[in-house]
Amino acid sequence: DTGKSGYDHYMLKEIHEQPSSLRQCLRGRVNELQGSVTLEELDAVVEQEFASPVQFVACGTSYHAALYAASLLQQEETPATATIASEFTTDRVPVNDGSLVVGITQSGETADTLRALREANRAGATTLAVTNTVGSSAARAADHALYIRAGPEIGVAATKTFASQQLALLLLSVALTGRSSHDDIQSLRRVPDQVQTILDTSSARAIAAELVDSQAFFFIGRGMHHPVALEGALKFKEITYEHAEGFAAGELKHGPLALVTEDTPVFAIVTGDGGTARKTISNIKEVEARDAPVVVVTDGVSDVERYADHVLRIPETDECSAAVLANVQLQLIAYWVANEMGRSIDKPRNLAKSVTVE
Ligand code: G6P
């Protein structure tokens, strides 16, 4: 199949397209000299003052992007929430003409997300669709659209669209909060090259071959890396059909630790050397004490590698950009385990690229 450009699967091709799709996402939107972000299509939204928290709604992988987006805004002291679209109703979540409701959907056709956007419109909210598809139902249903420009994605498992959602939401958070420095903008600009470095150097394939026969696979992260852990597990279960779960690192001890054995690898995301990293490292020690194989996704800043059986390295950057980079390593882990198992990677059983029923 020539469409795969020599790759065995669309998913692997699309993983490798990320440096270029991420560059497309940034194109014309960042000004390094001024340390600013311009999203022309959103000028009217950015100027508006909103009375209530910014509400992100989405499903599946896009919901993980929504959690990430809410964390980005919260970090800048802008209240924000993330809600699964099928759980979003305006009688339970207060929405009025002072609200901004952001539907995140790569296809722009997900029924649950469309319903949420339409309901928010009826309640008087300003609505925004963050989507990959120009002219999609979501783009038409919402007052405004922000395009992530990932290009077409054939693999059912979302990869490059998730990375582009993250980057577009980083841009959106800078635009909405007006907070950015020259350094922030520089780290944004470096993301595409850093993803390329990961693709060129990742040890995911060898690690996947070692761990493929495990009983279950757990993913943990804290702060910006919590949604990445959830997404790592979702990608993994979608294409391997194995039991995979993502947890907030701090929640492990409140239940899931009962599942951890020497046969359940734990993938942990740790970047920097601040309080967040140190707390995740103590959670890692807890799983290590249960003899679980520990795989760390890390920039190598802390001493976390001392507690790891395997390391997936990412370049050093701030935590927000690191969440984009860490996810790429977990995409590769999911891909190579599924490949080792001979799964139907581009068309996993029971799943569809977009779901147009509620
Ligand atoms: C389907 C796909 C998922 C996707 C979800 C939301 O379930 O299989 O990969 O994350 O829909 O899709 P959307 O187009 O709204 O981002």
Image (cartoon, grey):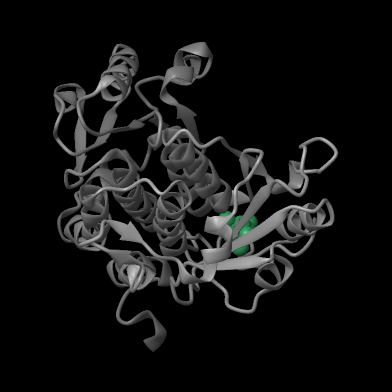
Q: Nearer the viewer, residue 284 or 318?
A: 318
Q: Quadrant of ligand 1?
A: bottom right
Residue 166: % across, % down: 43, 53
Q: Residue at x 38, y 26 (%)?
A: 263
> Vertical placement of 111 versus 333: above or below?
below
Q: Nearer the viewer, residue 152 or 275?
A: 275
User: From where the camera sits, is residue 230 visible?
Assistant: no
Residue 265: % across, % down: 35, 30
- Rendered-image quadrant of the C terminus: bottom right
Residue 240: % across, % down: 47, 50
Asked whether, in this view, residue 81 is left or right of residue 342, the answer is right
Q: Nearer the viewer, residue 232 or 238?
A: 232
Q: Residue at x 62, y 66 (%)?
A: 144
Residue 121: % across, % down: 78, 57
Q: Residue furthest bottom?
A: 2
Number of disc labels: 0
- Rendered-image quadrant of the N terminus: bottom left
Asked whether, in this view, residue 244 is left or right of residue 313, the answer is right
Asked whether, in this view, residue 259 is left or right of residue 128, the answer is left
Asked whether, in this view, residue 350 is left or right of residue 153, the answer is right
Quarter-wise, where is residue 89 in the image?
top right
User: From where the camera sits, is residue 210 visible?
Assistant: yes
Q: Residue at x 60, y 48 (%)?
A: 49
> Vertical placement of 304 versus 78: above or below?
above
Q: Residue at x 20, y 27 (%)?
A: 308
> Vertical placement of 116 versus 264: above or below?
below
> Vertical placement of 99 versus 35: above or below?
above
